[in-house]
């Protein structure tokens, strides 16, 4: 299973972020072709490495790397990328990782 995680830094306007993220961004992302599951961690996020600026983490699940490539090449995927700029206007406002994992 392939995952994409988006780690958002604490926004300047938390109320705006929450409203837009939960009412606009997540519903848009849920239309991505091939999306299996979408999880959000918000509040109670602790870092063992001293990072204290993490506000929210979104995790999206897809069947394969091919599936996630198709999803983000779609119109919905392009719209999600544009909409993400509303939540995190600068690349340093968010860290995004895409990875396949194996059970060990």
Image (tube, rainbow, N blue to C red):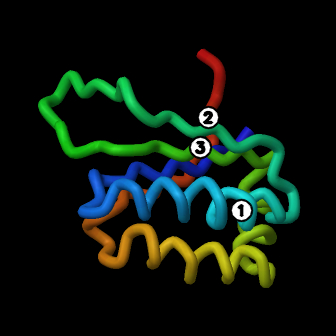
Give the vertical position of 34 relative to 52 (above or below): below
Mark before the other along the chain sequence, 3 or 1? 1
Residue 92 appears at what percent x and percent y?
26, 67
Q: Is residue 61 left or right of residue 44?
A: right
Give the residue number, with chain letter if any, for mark 1: 29
- Depth order, front residue of 55/23: 23
Give the residue number, with chain letter if any, for mark 2: 101
Callout 2–callout 1 Cβ contact below 8 Å: no
**Measuring 78% from the left and 57% from the top, which residue is drawn there?**
30
Farthest left residue? 50
Give the residue number, with chain letter if any, for mark 3: 59
**Measuring 29% from the left and 43% from the top, which residue is drawn there?**
54
**Measuring 42% from the left and 63% from the top, which residue is drawn there?**
16
Mark before the other along the chain sequence, 2 or 1? 1
Residue 75 appears at what percent x and percent y?
79, 84
Give the vertical position of 27 relative to 88 (above or below): above
Q: Is residue 42 left or right of residue 13?
A: right
Residue 23 appears at what percent x and percent y?
65, 59
Callout 3–callout 1 Cβ contact below 8 Å: no
* Residue 90, quarter of picture: bottom left
Q: Secondary structure at mark 1?
A: helix
Mark 2 packing: few (<14 Cα in 10 Å), some, or many (20+)? few
- Marks 2/3: CA–CA distance: 14 Å
- Depth order, front residue of 26/68: 26
- Depth order, front residue of 72/102: 72
- Marks 2/1: CA–CA distance: 22 Å
- Marks 3/1: CA–CA distance: 11 Å
């Amino acid at each position: 299973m392939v995952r994409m995680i988006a780690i958002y830094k604490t926004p300047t306007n938390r109320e705006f972020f929450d409203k837009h993220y939960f009412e606009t961004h997540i519903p848009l992302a849920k239309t991505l072709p091939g999306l299996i599951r979408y999880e959000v961690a918000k509040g109670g996020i602790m870092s063992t490495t001293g990072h204290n600026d993490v506000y929210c983490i979104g995790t999206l699940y897809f069947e394969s790397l091919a599936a996630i490539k198709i999803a983000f090449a779609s119109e919905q995927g392009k719209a999600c990328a544009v909409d993400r700029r509303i939540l995190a206007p600068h690349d340093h406002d968010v860290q995004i990782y895409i990875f396949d994992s194996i059970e060990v």
